[in-house]
Image: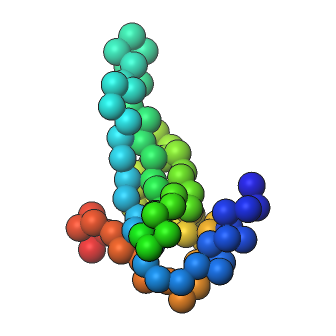
Amino acid sequence: MTFMPDFAAQLKGVAAVDGKSLRRAYDHVDGQSPLRLVNVWAVEQRLVLGQLLVDEKSNEIQAVPDILEWLSLTDVTITADAMHC
């Protein structure tokens, strides 16, 4: 679990943060909500730096600081959608 944070620490440029709900991941029988992930994407390298499963009682906004802290990004411009304004 240390490779990507070590790689990300050397990254320069732009990283994009976005949350996604997995299609067809809703459990109709148990009534569980769909799986939701937060992704960090290295734009110039075209590489996913990390993904974090968002807790069912949480949301993307609360999960983003956790994954960015785990990746220890420095000197990187982080972009996100309007939800994070």
Q: Is residue 33 visible?
A: no
At 43% from the left and 15% from the top, the residue drawn is 30
At 39% from the left and 10% from the top, the residue drawn is 29
Nearer-the-camera pick, 16 or 61: 16
Q: Could you tell whether 23 is left or right of 74 in the image?
A: left
Q: How is the image coloured?
A: rainbow
In the image, residue 56 sits, relative to residue 33, either above or below, namely below
Q: For the view shown, which residue lies furthest in the right direction? A: 2
Quarter of the N terminus within the rendering: bottom right
Quarter of the C terminus within the rendering: bottom left
In the image, residue 76 sits, relative to residue 2, either above or below, namely below
Q: For the view shown, which residue lies furthest in the front direction? A: 45
Q: Residue 58's spot in the image, x, y percent?
A: 45, 49
Q: Residue 45's spot in the image, x, y percent?
A: 49, 69
Q: Quadrant of residue 32?
A: top left
In the image, residue 82 sits, relative to residue 77, either above or below, namely above
Q: Could you tell whether 59 is left or right of 8 in the image?
A: left
Q: Could you tell whether 47 is left or right of 61 in the image?
A: right
Q: Quadrant of residue 28?
A: top left
At 67% from the left and 70% from the top, the residue drawn is 7
